Amino acid sequence: MTMNPAEQKSWRDRAAALQNIPPVLKLLWKSGPGAVSGEMISRVLAALVPVATLWVAATIINIVVGKIKNPGEPFPSSIWFWLALEFSLAALGSIFGRLIGYFDGRIADNFSAEVSVRIMQHAATLDLTSFEDPVFYDKLERARVQATDRIAMLNAIGNVVQQFVTLASLAIALFIYNPLLFFFLVICVVPSFLGESHFAFLGYSLAYRLTPLRRELDYLRVLGTSRENAKELKIFGLAPWLRERFSGLTEQLIDENRNMAKRRLGWGTVFAILGSLGYYGAYAYVVVQALQLKISIGYLQFLVGTIGGTSTQIAAIFSTFSSIADQSLFLTDLIEFFAMKPHIHSSENAIPAPRPIREGFDFQNVRFHYPGAERLVLRDLNLRIEPGERIALVGANGQGKTTLVKLITRLYDPTGGRILLDGIDLREYDIDSLQREIGVIFQDFVRFDMPARANIGVGRLEHMDNECRVREAARKSRADEILRKLPGDLEQMLGRRFEGGVDLSGGEWQKFALARAYLRDAQVLILDEPTAALDAVAEFEVFKRFSELSEGRMALLISHRFSTVRMADRIVVLEDGAIREQGTHDQLLSRGGLYAEMFELQAANYR
Ligand SMILES: Nc1ncnc2c1ncn2[C@@H]1O[C@H](COP(=O)(O)OP(=O)(O)OP(=O)(O)O)[C@@H](O)[C@H]1O
Ligand SMILES: [Mg+2]
């Protein structure tokens, strides 16, 4: 087997991957020390059964042969003791086997629960940037799968411990008889181990390389079968096109896997034959010894069993071990995922957000581009937002309105310049405390497939069970009208995912999302096109209530509808990542600039 330099380097990676095992073992232990201890004790005891059984069987044969050689001797009644002992060993073996199965099951449950919870916990701490990065997604996906797939590895670790104890007991017996025999066996099994682990590594790098492909397959599968897309797929007749794409990718996957399996088949056979050679060499040696009457029949039986057992155990250990090494390579993703640190976090001596806010926000020469993109989305943006102000942010698609909201809420930090709140850089504030003061409904707000109460309650979890507050928030956002139509009222399951769920229209979902913002009771309210799906009457109502609510607070409204925008105290027109003009509706109209132009265009449609 020749190795190119890349493969050679990969051997080092493979060894390095074993470093992943200790942290995982720690995780395993934490997920349930009781089950782990139980498993280990059962395994060690089970491991001693084979050598004991061989010993007892050899003794029985020697007793029988002794009686055959000397038929005149009395019946050897000690045979009953040995037979009973052999039976007890068999019974113990099966009891331990079952115990191991029982503990394995418990460990698997504990571990996957523990890892899943930790992944969720950790994902929640990471930056939004990470989630918008496809490489991160691959990593997260692989880490997620590991929670369940790596259970085979945990079994393998248990197995290897058991195999080691069995091997040690057999090896001691063999060693006592003839150390050379033992070494002969080991040397024959080594090539097979190297081969196994080599292919394990190739398998891993293949799986690694194919992750994007598998993600695309998953995506196509979901795309082709989900309810949300059914409408469009049908009308455009996309099903055959999707299917073809899917089949094409699947073929590629199958091809790669087949090539690998073929190579494995060839080399695997060669190594297996080498292993057998060792076993039969040792076997022949012992048989010859017996024929030369150097050892008894019982001893022959014992040695043959021991040689067989040793060679099986060595091969098993090597292959279990290489499967552990193989699996531990996959753990790299899990460990790397856990090692990822958010860039945006509260600083050491972060201060709580001010309450009440006295001076408001001040954007000073703020520049921003998304990570991995060159183009500046915001360029030297200067903007003040004072308490009590209602600001409307307008601009064509892609001018950076939503981006500005992401900066205020610290989902991202500016690439240049700074944003002050009450004269202090946003980065000095504790993030949680800052975000608690901001109620924001994004364009792509979440529709929770959960009861109506939860859809409002997520705005402020501690008020979820406060009937009064939840209803008040629903009233303000006009979600109360929808609640009246729902048979289950606040406990009505929404969305189609779960049984008994009721789906809502886009505008109705939006009213629930608005209710969240009202429930939050924050000092800053940001609505990113909150009314896009609302009808004209609803929109008017929402804004009337919005202006009542936002009295004395700050509100930022992003909208493409000038009928609502004009109600704001100040209108800010964003173009090319900078402020083009600002002022009240009337001021901007009389200026005759971009705003007036856009307004006229829209107004003309209504005449
Ligand atoms: N996660 C992202 N990664 C890279 N670029 C992005 C990302 N989100 C937005 N952009 C880019 O930043 C620019 C501004 O986007 P933004 O969402 O702020 O626009 P917007 O003013 O809210 O537009 P719209 O009116 O359509 O909502 C766009 O050109 C967009 O392509
Ligand atoms: Mg937007």
Image: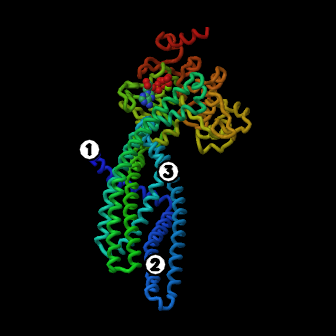
Q: Would you name the residue on which mark 2 appears? A: 56
- Please give the name of the residue rendered at 39% of the width and 56% of the height, measured from the top-left corner: 21
**Amino acid type, mark 2:** Val
Front-lying residue, 412 or 53:
53
- Please give the name of the residue rendered at 33% of the width and 68% of the height, measured from the top-left corner: 282
171 up-or-down from 417: above or below: below
Q: Which mark is residue 148?
A: 3
Q: Which mark is residue 4?
A: 1
Q: Is residue 553 visible?
A: no
**Amino acid type, mark 1:** Asn
Front-lying residue, 543 or 230:
230
Residues at discs 1 and 3 in contact (Cβ within 8 Å): no
187 up-or-down from 206: above or below: below
Residue 518 at x, y percent in the picture: 60, 34
The image quarter containing residue 133 is top left
**Amino acid type, mark 3:** Thr
Residue depth check, mark 2 versus mark 1: number of the one nearer the observer: 2
How far apart are the two marked residues, 2 and 3, measured between alpha carbons? 41 Å
Q: Which mark is residue 312?
A: none
Front-lying residue, 58 or 152:
58
How far apart are the two marked residues, 2 and 1, measured between alpha carbons? 52 Å
Front-lying residue, 280 or 581:
280
For ligand 1, tell me if the residue under mark 2 lies within 8 Å.
no
Residue depth check, mark 2 versus mark 3: number of the one nearer the observer: 2
Residue 219 at x, y percent in the picture: 50, 34
Q: Quadrant of the C terminus?
A: top right
569 lies left or right of 168: right
